[in-house]
Every structure is written in structure tokens, then in C-alpha cells.
Amino acid sequence: MKQPDNKVELIKGKGGVFEITCENKLVFSKKSLNRFPTDDEIDSIASM
């Protein structure tokens, strides 16, 4: 499987917030969905 060449940065937060942004656009929010992303969602996000 080809791996995307994306930069990943962990920004420590508070309150259990887990969000994924791509090019300053929010693409996943645990706070909004009340769950972590699935493996398939992570693969899809990483391919952006």
C-alpha cells in the first residue's frame, strides 16, 4: 500500500478534544461525533 507523504503534528489539548484538520479545514471532530475515527476513516483522511 502506498503511504501518503503528509506532515502530521500533535497539538496537545484539553478536555478530550480530538480533531483532525487538513489544510486548515476540520475533517474530523471527536467532540462533534462523540467517538474516535475508525481505521477506515483514518486511512481516508491520510489519503487527502
Image (spheres, grey):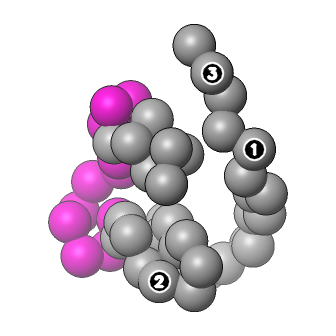
Residue 25 numbered tag: 2
Label 3 sits on residue: 2
- At label 1, counting other C-alpha atoms closer than 10 Å, the crowd grade (few under 14, some 14-19, many 20 or more) is few
Spatial separation of the CA atoms under disc 2 and disc 1: 18 Å
What amino acid type is highlighted by mark number 2? Lys
What amino acid type is highlighted by mark number 3? Lys
Label 1 sits on residue: 5
Point out the image quarter for the N terminus: top right
Q: Is residue 45 above or below residue 15?
A: above
Q: Tell me whether the residue at label 2 lies in contact with that at label 1, contact meaning CB atoms closer than 8 angstroms.
A: no
Residue 40 place in picture, x, y as percent: 33, 31
Mark 2 vs mark 1: give the one in front: 1
Secondary structure category for the residue under label 3:
loop
Residue 35 place in picture, x, y as percent: 27, 54
Q: Is residue 19 above or below residue 6?
A: below
Q: Looking at this rendering, what residue extends furthest in the top direction?
A: 1
Magenta residues, as a range?
30-40
